[in-house]
Image (cartoon, grey):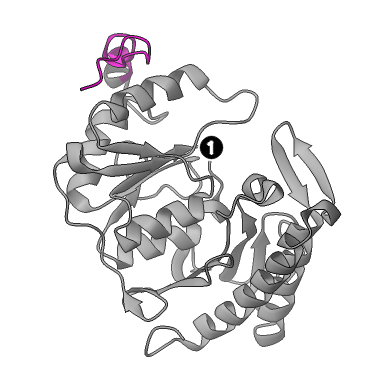
Amino acid sequence: MSSPNLHPMINVAIKAARAAGAIINRAALDLEAVRISQKQVNDFVTDVDQAAEQVIIETLLAAYPGHAIWAEESGREHGAKDSELVWIIDPLDGTTNFIHGFPVYCVSIALAVKGKIEQAVIYDPSRNDLFTATKGRGAYMNDRRLRVSKRIRLQECLISTGFPFRPGDDFNAYLRMMGDVMQRCAGLRRPGAAALDLAYVAAGFTDGFFETGLQPWDVAAGSLLVTEAGGLVGNFTGEPDFLEQNECLAGNPKVYGQLVGILGKYSKFASAGEKAGLGQVGPTLAMANFP
């Protein structure tokens, strides 16, 4: 079951996400048989990602042959090239978790209309949790309307993140960011699937989320869930136009504002003055005085 007054396009996306989830769940029963290849160091793709992506694209294009597709594995090779309606697809977010049998991964499908996300589906096949949002109509988990958490004191908040894992990522900056946030919050978590991290902010399971190096297909659907649940999403300096900027910050409005205050100086969009304080302000983990 899912939220009331569903938009027809959401119904098609749900059908696509559940079909992909069925492929993923079947494969999870025999992980030894899953074929894995590496796109780059620590960046894996499996035949399951590809099969899930294929069924999503087939389902969407059967209903909407005139729409465009932008998918993680196949890029923009399917669908109409010039449509203003673009489905943005991550068939299996959390592939590294999936390969290990660590049950935190999901399917993410969003529809952008003229560059703005209007429909979103995130499906967690191991828990059978379905998150949906339509612009202006709220966000839902299964049948329940979602609201971001009401916590305002950062020291009571649970914040999620993702660690850098590719060569060329700035590990030292990330360690400083983690140190800055860890000291000020109740807990920092790294579940391993950014789309689910955003869904969890929308549901109020966590109070905020930040990560760098993300691609549009990681965050497109989750960002609409957050805003439709009353939260804010942007880059580290708080600019809302973040989709292709490789950094994402989300939270309830009060927590979001506080995280911008902590993380803004780490943004590649920060001013020279903000960045000048980086050396002194970010404590290293070794020096951090944990309360």
In the image, is residue 285 part of the stretch drawn in magenta? Answer: yes
Residue at 26 percent across and 29 percent down: it is: 262
Residue at 67 percent across and 60 percent down: it is: 71
In the image, is residue 20 part of the stretch drawn in magenta? Answer: no
The answer to whether residue 37 is left or right of residue 133 is: right
- Figure label count: 1
- Residue 129 pos. (x, y %): 48, 70
Judged from the image, the secondary structure of the residue bearing numbered disc 1 is loop
**In the image, residue 97 above or below residue 55:** above
Pointer 1: what residue? 213
Q: Nearer the viewer, residue 275 or 80?
A: 275
Residue extending farthest left: 153
**In the image, residue 226 above or below residue 23:** above
Q: Nearer the viewer, residue 135 or 170?
A: 170
User: If the image is split into quadrants, where does the C terminus sit?
Assistant: top left
Q: Which residues are magenta?
A: 275-291
- Residue 244 pos. (x, y %): 51, 46
How crowded is the residue under tag 1: few (<14 C-alpha within 10 Å), some, or many (20+)? Answer: some
The answer to whether residue 120 is left or right of residue 41 is: left
The answer to whether residue 287 is left or right of residue 101 is: left
Residue 107 picture quarter:
bottom right
Residue 211 picture quarter:
top left
- Residue 130 pos. (x, y %): 48, 73
Name the magenta segment's main secondary structure.
loop
Residue at 29 percent across and 58 percent down: it is: 204
Residue at 27 percent across and 57 percent down: it is: 231
The answer to whether residue 203 is left or right of residue 54 is: left
- Residue 123 pos. (x, y %): 54, 68
Hey, what amino acid is under mark 1? Answer: Gly
